[in-house]
Every structure is written in structure tokens, then in C-alpha cells.
Image (cartoon, rainbow, N blue to C red):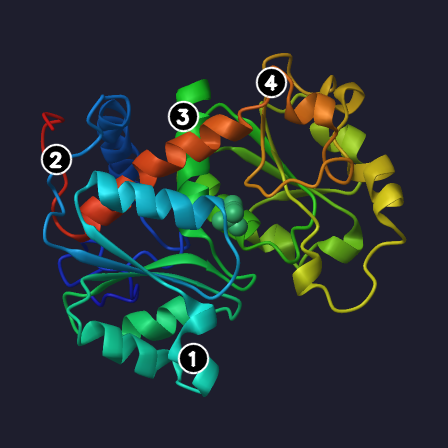
Amino acid sequence: MINRNPQLGKNRALQHLLTTEGLPASILRQILDTAETFMGVTEREVKKVPLLRGKSIFNLFFEPSTRTRTTFEIAAKRLSADVINLNIAVSAQSKGETLLDTVDNLSAMHADMFVVRHSQSGAAHLIAKHVQPGIHVINAGDGRHAHPTQALLDMFTIRRYKKEFHNLRVAIVGDILHSRVARSQIHALTTLGVPEVRVIAPKTLLPRQVERLGVRVYHDMRSGLRDVDVLMMLRLQKERMQGAYLPSSEEYFKYYGLTPEKLALARPNAIVMHPGPMNRGVEIDSDVADGNQSVILPQVTYGIAVRMAVMAILAGSQPSDGSI
Ligand code: CP
């Protein structure tokens, strides 16, 4: 069989994590199940296992990050890896060094894994194609293309609160057009068997032919939220907007901001998610963000176990029986 997925090796095992698109359900479930075994580690007094001892993991964040960068660092340290956070602002990139020359030089320092965030879609793919076999690349968000570990921690959160995927109605609300998170969520949700994925947004914030991804489109938030089990809110990604997509943030909040009144249209036990960073009063009201249906902070906590799972699987060091 020809392997068309650059993330998978000849034996169909995960070599890099670049996108959730095209990843088989078996691998998504393997990551979620492995993350579940790591949840116990994160609750111990000594939150460390020796699975990645001696490995060097380089965090290359060319874009700002709070959650992803920090939880990758925590995850790597809990696996006993050595973590190197390249400070891009004072690196030789500022003297004109290319991305691949930087990667080559870090590889010469015996890097085992690169965690890459970049404003250019495709940056992590480029590095994955370039590095020597045995070096693994994890996409920590590239342009508007993909943010696979965010989608995986979102799937983990959904499974923790809802148990199954096959009986859910999920709505993704907001700036789908510029969102790498939304794309990765849609691929993961449909692969894991969610029967109804809705996207709710003004026409200007939806990609053309978004229906082809297997979603139902709603422009009216009140119709779109009716009877959903999971709400995934997105911020307006102004750093990726060129031109005017909206009259104003106030207008946007009126039509697409999640308030307690709009949340009441969803199922009574619906959960509210947000990848962060949140813009309170723009896409979400504080009463909802801090309310009892919000699982926004648990998402962050689960991100540690999910990122531990991804790194352990890539390194071929996953726990086999949960006895870690
Ligand atoms: N969700 C997310 O990617 O957040 P950060 O930008 O803080 O990493």
C-alpha cells in the first residue's frame, strides 16, 4: 500500500504530528487512551516518569503562545526529557538565518523532537520533510492551517465529559475562516464519528465550500445552538485578518457572542469550550466563561496529558499497560 500521509511511517506508525486531517481513528484513539494513562501521573506528588529520559526536545515558537508552549514544556519535563526553549527574539533568525538552517544546527546538537509554532501554514510540514529519520516534528499551530494537539486535547475533554462521540451534536462558533483550531477540530470530530458538526459564523468568517468538510452551516447563532451538546467558541483572529470582516466587535458580540441567554438554547448539560486566549465581551460573556458549564480550564489541564501522550507515542515509548 502507498503511504500518502507524511505523518505516518512505513508501518503506519506516527512519525510526526502535523495535522489531524487524514489521521485514522485508531491513532486518534491511541493518543486519547495514552493520555488517559498519563492523567494519573499528573495527579501524583512526584509528577514524573522516565519514558523520555535522555531525549532532547526543542520548542521553536515563532508566534506568541501561553497554553501550548507551557504545557508542551511541562509535558516534556514530566516525561523526564531535556527541554530547550529557543528564544526566537534573540536567536540568529534575527540575523537572517533560514528556518531550515536553524533546524539543521539544532539537529547537530542531537535534537530528538521539534515542537513548532509558526505563522506560515506548512512550516511544520517543511521541517518534517527536511529532518533526518528518527527526528520527530510536532505542529504546535501553523498559520490558519492546523493545530492538532489543540484538537486532540479538545477531543479528550469531550470524551471525559460526554463519554462517547457517536451521539453528539457539536457546534463550532466564530471565526472559522482564520482558525487552524477549527480545521483540526472538524477533522478530528468527523473521524471519531460525531454525527453532526455545525459551524456558526457570519458569511465573511467562513471558508468557501466549508460544507465539503462535512459540517452544517448556520449563520443564525440561535438556530445553530439549538440542542447542541458541545459548544466550541473561537476568538476573532485579528492578527490573520487583512481587511474588514465585521462592522465592530460590539456588533459581533450582539450576534455571535455567547451569553447565558443564548447558551440556554443548547442542551441543559451542554459543555462550553474555548481554546484560548479568550476575548471576554467579544465572543464570550464572562458569565458563561466562568459559569458552571464552562470546561475551559480543564481543557488546559488535559493538554498536559495529551501532549505527553503525543511525545511518548512519537518516541516509541508509550506505556503498554498503564503501569507507569
Ligand atoms: N490554544 C492556544 O493555542 O493557545 P496559545 O496561543 O496560548 O498557545
Q: Nearer the viewer, mark 1 or mark 2?
A: 1
Q: Earlier in the sequence, mark 3 or mark 2?
A: 3
Residue 11 vs residue 265: left or right?
Answer: left
Q: Which mark is residue 159?
A: 3
**Kind of residue sitting beneath label 4:** Gln
Residue 102 vs residue 120: left or right?
Answer: left
The answer to whether 260 is drawn above or below residue 147 in the figure is above
The residue pinned by badge 2 equals 319
Q: Quadrant of residue 318?
A: top left
Q: Residues within 10 Å of mark 2 (few under 14, many from 20)?
A: some
Alpha-carbon span between mark 3 and mark 2? 20 Å
Q: Earlier in the sequence, mark 1 or mark 3?
A: 1
Q: Earlier in the sequence, mark 1 or mark 2?
A: 1
Q: Which mark is residue 293?
A: 4
Alpha-carbon span between mark 1 and mark 3? 41 Å
The residue pinned by badge 1 equals 93
Residue 193 visible in the current orientation: no
Image location of residue 21, percent across then percent down: 42, 55
**Kind of residue sitting beneath label 2:** Pro
Q: Residue furthest bottom?
A: 96
- Please say if the residues under marks 2 and 4 sit with CB atoms less than 8 Å apart: no
Residue visible at 51% across and 62% down in the picture: 63
Residue 302 visible in the current orientation: yes
